[in-house]
Amino acid sequence: MDFIRRALLSMKAKKGRTLLLSAVFSAILIFVLAGLTIRSAALSATENAKKSVGATVTLSTNRQNGMERSEGEDGSERPDPSSFTVTPVNLEDAEKISALDNVKSYSFISSSSAGATDDITPISSSDDSEDENTAASSSTATEGEGMMGGAPGGEMMGGGEAGGAAAMMQSDFQVTGVMELSMYSGFSEGTSSIVEGEAITAEDEGTNNIVIEQTLAEANELSVGDTFTITSPEDEETTYEVTIKGIYETSESSSSMGTMFNFLNPANMLYSSYTFANTLKGDDSEGTIDSASYTLSDPESMDQFVAEAEKLVDTETFSLQTNDQMYQQMLQPLNNVASFATNIVVLVAVAGVIILTLIVMMTIRERRYEIGVLLSMGEARVKVIMQFFTEILVCMLFALVVASFSGNIVGNVIGEQLLEQQTESTQTASNDNEMGQGGPSGNRGGGNFGSIGASSQEAAQEIQEMDITVTADQIVMLAGMGILISFGSILLSSIGIIRLQPRKILTT
């Protein structure tokens, strides 16, 4: 083992060269460790993303098959525009799907409308009194036409039947029935929030509890616990007494249509349990919902879940629409960061081998006489190479200690900057996409036709930080890569040592 002793003595004699190798190796290992920690943190964040935000699958009417097809004049089939029907989702089928594996949470939605009574006055514009008279006249005319054989109006808001257009104009409130109000888009995105009382939950099933907008409550001097009556959308003589469970505020602005029709004004939106919304729609809607939304715990198994769910419903009448946009949006920055970190490790490792090879080759030229003496004394070439390898290995051990303490700092700085850039890029692309589709969800006008699930903005907020820490496994991996880098550099530079002849060295 004389080559080890010679290596240590050589390093002691050439302190400058030893410090140079140690400094270069430290820089190499610091960036390699930074890449390893960033990649590990990104992969860990990806696993957490699967647990925190899942893909969403929505069960609703298959609108493509909601029209009958008739033969046109040219002999081709075309949809009949007057035959559109909406088949409500059977509640039992929706509950069967909710019992499948991989369902993290679920919610049901059922929408209806309601009219005002003397107990409450809806929020309206100054011209509404005239509009209401016009609507009443239109209603009378429409009903007369229907009785004389004219075609009845279209489908009502919330699933009503004949006279829908006239009845919709007469409606003062839009009633959105949910299972969990906190999962509804406006509340999950932050455009709406409870300011008094409590939100609608699954415990409100079978009750007439509602949540009303703050402006509507103040205008009618209503508070939590008060009651008032509303009318059925089908029969004004049928009234329902509702109890205010909570009051919410919303940042939504009303569209021009909201000034013409009361039910399109965001202030006239009432939230209730889906069971009460069905009650408003009549006995025919009992045991049905408009749609069901399922949030999956593992987005990667979304296709398998859809395949199992399709076996439980009539796919000709209903459709299962998938949406893993939030999950993909969360993963895109993380995947980009992880890929970039992997590239850092590979590039720095390759660059390290090249740099160290050049340094070692330069030292070999300076130590040609030393190599010639050792070879002339019968020292094996392998031991000469092992001496150089030992010198680099000792420098690597010193660099490993330096990298272990400083690699975490460098990794956090680089990792957070990379994640911030990737997140901003993803959010910009998402915002551009949303604007192209008519604006952010929940703020596209007075109707407030929202959906279940967290917003993409909220999803992006969950990945603005990564837990970048150095672990023992990473140190072991770094040491292994350091040895490989040392071995690679010595292997390339040893070609010159093998070709050297002692006599030629000592005589030149």
Image (tube, rainbow, N blue to C red):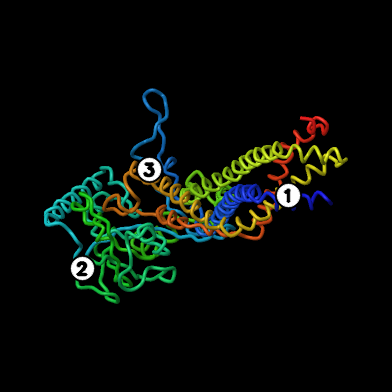
Task: Report which residue position mark 3 lands on.
Answer: 433
Q: Quadrant of the C terminus?
A: top right
Q: Where is residue 395 in the image (x, y as percent from the top left)?
A: 67, 51
Judge depth for marks 3 and 2 and give the one in front: 3
Marks 3/2: CA–CA distance:
40 Å
Judge depth for marks 1 and 2 and give the one in front: 1
Q: Does any portion of residue 152 appear in the rendered image?
A: yes
Q: Earlier in the sequence, mark 1 or mark 2?
A: 1
Q: Position of residue 426 (x, y in %)?
A: 43, 46
Q: Which of 256 and 506 is in front in this view?
A: 506
Quarter of the rendering containing residue 44: bottom right
- Looking at the image, the residue that sits furthest to the top is 74
Identified at 60% across, 57% down, the residue is 402
Compared across the picture, whether 370 is left or right of 139 comes to right
Amino acid tagged 1 = Ser
Q: In the displayed structure, would residue 223 be above or below residue 193? A: below
Q: Position of residue 305 (x, y in %)?
A: 57, 51
Task: Report which residue position mark 1 lands on.
Answer: 10
Amino acid tagged 3 = Asn
Compared across the picture, whether 7 is left or right of 350 comes to right
Identified at 63% across, 53% down, the residue is 399
Marks 1/2: CA–CA distance:
95 Å
Helix, strand or loop at label 3? It is helix
Q: Of the numbered discs in the image, which one, if any, rests on residue 376?
A: none
Task: Report which residue position mark 2 lands on.
Answer: 120
- Looking at the image, the residue that sits furthest to the front is 507
Marks 1/3: CA–CA distance:
64 Å
